[in-house]
Image: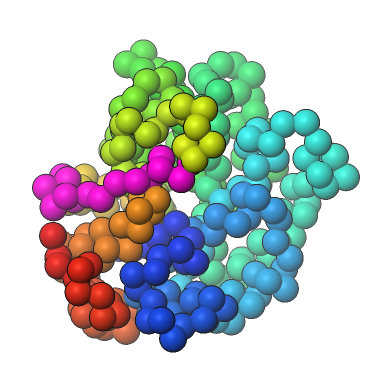
C-alpha cells in the first residue's frame, strides 16, 4: 500500500525549478521531486498522442499521470463540443489520447470533476452510469462540486453507487462555502485507488463573485502545519481501504502547492523519487525554504 504526493500540473510551480530550467524541461525536472502529476491541459483540449508520448519519454518508468477529463465530457463546455460536435467522436478522440499512457502503464486514473450545477438528480446519475460505461475498464475518479451528493440522506447512497459502478472516490479538502462546495468524506470506493485533492480553504474566494480575476485567487491558500497534520490519520484510513492513495495539491493561486506537498512528504517520512529529502532539493529561495 502506498501514498503518492503530487501537484496539479507542472508548469506553474516556480519554487521547485532553478532559473536555468527552461519551460520545456520542467516536466523532467518535476519528476525528480514527485511520483505523480495531474494533467490539467486535457480539460481544455484533447491532446495528441504524440504529445502524450513526449511526456512519457521525459519521465521515469514509475512516474504516473492523472488525466483530467475533457470539459465536453463533464458538462463544463456548453453548446458545441468542438470535435465534430458528436459525443461519440469526442470519447473516441479522448480514448485514443490515453493509449500511450495505458500501453506504458503510466495512467493512474482519469479524473472526472463535474461542475457545481451537476447536482444529485436522476438524470445526472444516468450521465455518470453512461460515462463509466463509455470509459470501460479505464480507472476513473469522480469529484463532485455540489453538496447535494453528500447530504446526510444521500451520503451512503452516493458511496454505494460509486462502488457499484466502479468509480474511484476523489476526496476533497476545500472551503465550506455553500452548495458549490463539498465536505471532506474520508471513504474509499475502490480497493485499488483513492484520490485526494487539496484545493485550499479560501472561503472568501471560493465562489464566483463576477470579478474577472476570480479564478486567479480561488486557490490562493497556504496550508498550516496543523491543517496538514489533520490529514495524517485520514490518509492512514484511506490507505487501509485502498492499495494506492494519490494526493494532489491544487492550492496554487499563490504558488503554495509545491511547498505544501513537500511538507506533507516530510510528515509522511517520504523521500523524492531520487531518494533525497523533499526539502533538500528545493532551489535557492530562502524565503520559501522554512518547513512551516
Residue sitting nearer the eye, 192 or 270: 270
Front residue of this view, candidates 152 and 252: 252
Q: Is residue 227 within the magenta segment?
A: yes
Q: Is residue 199 above or below residue 78?
A: below
Which quarter of the image is occupied by the C terminus? bottom left
Residue 30: image location, x then y, percent: 42, 74
Q: Is residue 240 visible?
A: no
Up the image or down, 165 lies above or below 270; here it is above
Q: Quadrant of the N terminus?
A: bottom left
Q: Is residue 189 left or right of residue 211?
A: left
Determine the image quadrant of residue 102.
bottom right
The answer to whether residue 237 is left or right of residue 146 is left
Q: Residue at x 59, y 74 (%)?
A: 55
Tell me where the magenta segment starts and ends, as one range. 215-230
In the displayed structure image, the side of residue 10 where residue 112 appears, left or right:
right
Compared with 205, 273 (above or below) is below
Please name the residue shown 56% across and 25% down the image: 118
Q: Name the spot of residue 195 as percent of width and height, x first.
A: 39, 49
Residue drawn 70% across the image and 61% down it = 47
Q: Residue 232, position in %: x, y?
A: 17, 51
In the visual, does 257 lie left or right of 290? right
Which residue appears at 83% of the width and 47% of the height? 83
Amino acid at each position: 500500500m502506498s501514498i503518492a504526493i503530487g501537484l496539479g500540473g507542472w508548469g506553474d510551480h516556480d519554487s521547485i525549478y532553478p532559473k536555468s530550467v527552461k519551460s520545456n524541461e520542467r516536466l523532467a525536472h518535476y519528476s525528480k521531486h514527485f511520483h505523480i502529476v495531474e494533467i490539467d491541459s486535457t480539460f481544455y483540449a484533447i491532446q495528441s498522442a504524440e504529445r502524450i508520448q513526449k511526456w512519457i519519454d521525459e519521465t521515469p518508468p514509475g512516474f504516473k499521470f492523472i488525466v483530467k477529463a475533457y470539459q465536453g465530457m463533464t458538462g463544463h463546455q456548453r453548446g458545441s463540443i468542438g470535435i465534430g460536435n458528436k459525443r461519440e467522436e469526442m470519447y473516441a478522440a479522448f480514448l485514443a489520447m490515453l493509449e500511450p499512457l495505458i500501453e506504458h502503464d503510466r495512467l493512474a486514473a482519469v479524473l472526472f470533476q463535474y461542475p457545481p450545477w451537476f447536482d444529485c438528480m436522476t438524470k445526472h446519475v444516468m450521465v455518470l452510469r453512461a460515462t463509466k460505461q463509455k470509459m470501460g475498464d479505464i480507472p476513473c475518479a469522480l469529484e463532485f462540486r455540489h453538496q447535494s451528493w453528500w447530504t446526510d440522506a444521500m451520503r451512503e447512497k452516493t458511496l454505494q453507487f460509486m462502488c457499484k459502478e466502479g468509480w474511484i472516490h476523489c476526496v476533497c479538502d476545500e472551503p465550506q462555502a455553500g452548495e458549490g462546495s463539498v465536505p471532506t468524506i474520508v471513504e474509499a470506493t475502490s480497493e485499488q485507488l483513492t484520490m485526494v485533492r487539496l484545493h485550499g480553504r479560501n472561503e472568501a474566494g471560493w465562489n464566483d463573485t463576477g470579478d474577472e480575476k476570480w479564478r486567479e485567487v480561488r486557490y490562493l491558500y497556504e496550508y498550516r502545519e496543523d491543517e496538514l497534520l489533520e490529514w495524517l490519520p485520514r490518509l492512514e484510513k484511506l490507505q487501509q481501504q485502498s492499495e494506492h492513495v494519490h494526493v494532489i495539491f491544487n492550492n496554487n493561486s499563490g504558488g503554495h502547492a509545491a511547498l505544501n506537498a513537500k511538507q506533507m512528504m516530510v510528515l509522511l517520512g517520504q523521500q523524492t523519487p531520487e531518494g533525497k529529502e523533499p526539502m533538500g532539493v528545493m532551489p535557492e529561495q530562502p524565503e520559501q525554504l522554512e518547513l512551516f
